[in-house]
Amino acid sequence: MSSPSTDENGALLGPADIRELAAALGVRPTKQRGQNFVIDANTVRRIVRTAEVRPDDVVVEVGPGLGSLTLALLEAADRVVAVEIDDVLAAALPSTVAARLPGRADRFSLVHSDAMQVQELPGPAPTALVANLPYNVAVPVLLHMLDRFPSIERTLVMVQAEVADRLAAPPGSKVYGVPSVKAAWYAEVKRAGAIGRNVFWPAPNVDSGLVSLVRRAKPIETTATKAEVFAVVDAAFAQRRKTLRAALAGWAGSAAKAEAALVAAGVSPQARGESLTVDEFVAIAENKIVENEIVENKQD
């Protein structure tokens, strides 16, 4: 087990520390799990600073790996809960924390699980999510955590640059799509910086980006459920080149019913999904419900 550094990194892990830990554990980063370990202490300090982690924060971290970001978070937050799916990494992380930050070890908890399966976390409710998310599952993991833990007020995730662009894209943008709308359901989303390839081991073939999400002070008010709104979003972008009248025909039951819901929502049937705000998708979902209720009332 690597002993605490005596260089300018302090308790944080540098390139040599990461490689030493990995070698001791027999760990080789796998593409299957999208593992790219951060080896630069300045980068994790920057992430913590950009995330505006406060001394009273309870931070949940997904995919802590060997602990680079975990240690930086522990130095700044009240406590950190890390969710790790990898058996070897999950077993080793508490020892790394105890060796390098012994005075904060009691502020650290580990959940050995697939983040997509996590339904509860130990200790106080999390107030922030800060993570270097595996590229292959970044969006579903992010959305699951925001949905399952409404106490998370602030989120900063490092993801593939292309994914960062999609998450933060405004309506009308070429990359605006399902992730953009679903993230906007929960939060105000914006790009928060770029991360180069050389701060990772192994270096990925793509650049990374930081995305900031600040949860809405009040959830979107709607008579539709989240599942109903997301069903409209999925249908609208499943066939991007089609007008909403055509794209939502299957969802509504027919093109005519889709048009009726769109008109009632104040949305042009000739519009396309990439031009709509999350509030407009909500209005469409609500008006399908209203239409169904009208049909049922007529049958009564």
Image (cartoon, helix red, strand yellow):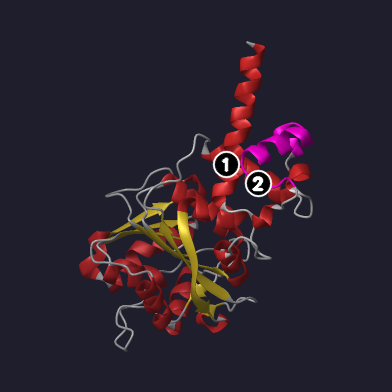
Residue 189 image point, x, y percent: 49, 62
Q: Would residue 203 appear left or right of 157 to someone viewing this image? A: right
Q: Would residue 251 appear left or right of 116 to someone viewing this image? A: right
Identified by mark 1, the residue type is Ala
Identified by mark 2, the residue type is Val
Would you say the residues marked 1 and 2 are in contact, meaning their CB atoms lie under 8 Å apart? yes
Q: Which segment did they paint magenta?
A: 249-269
Q: Reading the chain from its start, which is encountered first: label 1 or label 2?
A: 2
Quarter holding the N terminus is bottom left
Q: Quadrant of residue 82?
A: bottom left
Relative to 44, say whether 125 is above or below.
Answer: above
Tell me if residue 114 can be seen.
no
Relative to 29, say whether 80 is above or below.
Answer: above
Whether residue 254 appears in magenta in the rendering, the answer is: yes
Q: Secondary structure at mark 2?
A: loop
Whether residue 164 appears in magenta in the rendering, the answer is: no
Quarter holding the C terminus is top right
Q: Residue 267 shows which numbered tag? A: 2
Which residue lies most toward the left here? 103
